[in-house]
Amino acid sequence: MRTSFPALRKRPKELTFTRARISTGILGLDDILKGGVLPLRSYLIRGKPGTGKTLFGFHFLVKGAADGEPVLFVSLAEPDAQLRFEASTLGLTLDRVSILDLTPAPKTFKQLPPYDIFSPSEVEREPLLQQIARSIEIIKPRRIFFDSMLHFRYAASDTFQFRRIVQSFIRFAEQHGATALLSSEESALFPDDDLQFICDGVIHLELHDDERILTVLKFRGSDFRPGRNIVRVTSNGMEVRAG
Ligand SMILES: Nc1ncnc2c1ncn2[C@@H]1O[C@H](COP(=O)(O)OP(=O)(O)OP(=O)(O)O)[C@@H](O)[C@H]1O
Ligand SMILES: [Mg+2]
């Protein structure tokens, strides 16, 4: 029966849910996730600064690239060259990773935007979204790492609009065949509970003195090994051991 509500559909046409798994590319983590993440879903990688969110994204994308997949790193946090250098210190190369560098260019500092007329979010939001959408359409990535949602939150005018943008981004990525990882800073000023609800899975990273911990908080559609797991970061990259 046809309905006058476009959002109300009997059955999703475009999606095939499978039991297949996608490797995270992080040694030890796929076992904790009972084989890896589910394709065409979205996962939140959250933690305080320096806990390893960006390193997580490197591994995820490099694994896809090694399997011959087109992969996309959307960076609002660090410039392209800096990311490539940091990956190299972990023995990883981003040569086959497309990076959409959305960090402000140095010249931005001298070219004052008309912030006195429009709020910064009004000025910057549309071009950001358009660039991300266009990159996904051109590259057709199977994996996307978005670093970070906090920067995205700044570009939204309010929390309702931020959630709409995130949800539509996730649907857009899924529709174009991508599995998305979104990084998020844990911050008292900008809680990310909304992202934790929206995403299909949540992986929490912590750093305590000299100990790094990874905990899977949520994993829709799958079993997982609950509890704290030990993370090691060395010049060979990130690896996880059940705690
Ligand atoms: N080659 C390396 N060898 C050992 N440890 C490393 C190496 N490269 C990075 N690290 C560790 O990883 C941490 C950085 O991880 P990462 O940049 O992924 O954190 P993050 O959560 O993305 O931080 P932020 O929120 O500031 O972006 C560093 O603090 C450092 O301790
Ligand atoms: Mg980072």
Image (cartoon, rainbow, N blue to C red):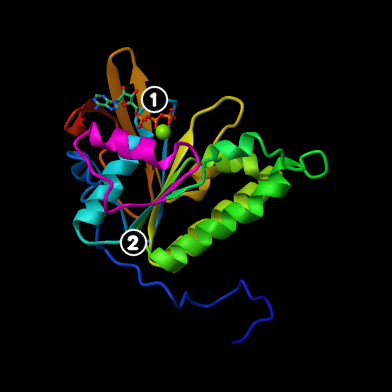
* Circle 1: element type: loop
Query: Which comes before the other along the chain, label 1 or label 2?
Result: 1
Given the current orientation, which residue lies at the most extreme bottom position? 1
Amino acid at the residue labelled 1: Gly
On screen, 236 above or below 20?
above
Magenta stretch: give its range: 73-99
Distance from mark 1 CB to nearest ligand 1 atom below 8 Å = yes
Question: At which x and y percent is residue 145?
Answer: 39, 48
Image spot of residue 18 (x, y percent): 29, 67
Residue at the disc numbered 1: 50
Residue at image coords 25%, 57%: 21
Please rate how many residues cluster around mark 2, counting C-alpha atoms within 10 Å: few if below 14, some from 14 to 19, many from 20: many
Q: Residue at x 65, y 55 (%)?
A: 126
Measure the C-alpha gap from mark 1 to mark 2: 27 Å
Find ligand 1 in the image and state its quadrant: top left
- The image quadrant of residue 139 is bottom left
State the image coordinates of residue 77 (x, y, percent, origin top left).
48, 37
Residue identified by numbered label 2: 142
- Residue at the farthest right position: 117
